[in-house]
Amino acid sequence: MALGIVIALILFFLLLPTLIVIPVSFGKAPYIEFPPKGLTFHWYQLYFTDPDWIAATLFSMRIAAATTVTATVIGTLASVALVRGELPGKSLVLGLALSPLIVPHIVIAIGLYLFFAPLKLTGNFFGFLLAHSMLTVPYVVISVSAALQRFDPILEKAALSCGAGRGRAFYAVVLPQITPAIVTGAVFAFVSSFDEATVAFFISGIEGKTITRKLFEDIDYNLTPVIAVVSTVIVGISIALMGAVRLSQRDEES
């Protein structure tokens, strides 16, 4: 009983910022106010009609979509090689693949800026794609590797013994079994790319500006409830994607 109460309090503490920012986004006051005195959709209208906010949002979505595809392909292939292959120094390769989860993002951001700036990769789509793919590949590797380790290799061997080639056996037998894990890793990659802030702050430019970089700028110079609207939009997209993954998993289990 006591453990359940402690867990509930921890979860409430983690959810508290989200529970606060959503009602703030509907407040009538021209500044951040909690609890809001009155409700309005005025700030949502400002967000959806502001070309700068929309441009930043669409730029972030383009980056997140491209990053998802890139990270999913690289992460899945890397997982197959790490779990099934006989790579020399496999532990070292795995450690390098997962290092973006361990190294502080501020350190990665400074290193990327110093590397990208001379190559003119700051503030453009390709630079963000490289940076965010590096940051999100670990999520795919963890998800797909776990699925591959749970997969019974006898099923693949049975396909091979029936005359299927290695590639056909993988696509016909292994891939359908690990698809939920691939989808889960892809969703984590999209969400992580879309709301990534630290690296984006360093490698954004005047034209190529993500929604998180625009958010930082407005917090400094234009602190209105539009900030809460943007935060709510980011939270809403993340919850919708996670919920879709959970529903698909539940359908497969049933």
Image (cartoon, rainbow, N blue to C red):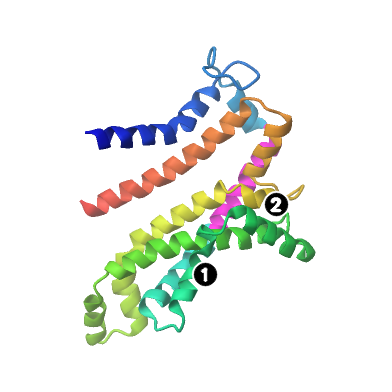
Q: Residue furthest top?
A: 37
Instruction: Please give the residue where the numbered disc 1 appears in the rendered image.
Output: 96
First in sequence: mark 2 vs mark 1: 1
In the rendered image, which quarter is residue 155 located in? Answer: bottom left
Magenta stretch, main secondary structure, is helix
Residue visible at 70% across and 51% down? 202
Membership of 167 in magenta stretch: no
Instruction: Please give the residue where the numbered disc 2 appears in the rendered image.
Output: 202
* Image side of residue 114 versus residue 35, left or right: right
Q: What's the CA distance linking mark 2 and mark 1?
A: 23 Å
* Image side of residue 104 versus residue 149, left or right: right
Q: SS class of the residue under badge 2?
A: helix
Residue visible at 58% across and 55% down? 104
Q: Looking at the picture, which amino acid does disc 1 mark? A: Leu
> What span is colored magenta in the figure?
50-67
Q: Mark 2 vs mark 1: give the one in front.
A: 1
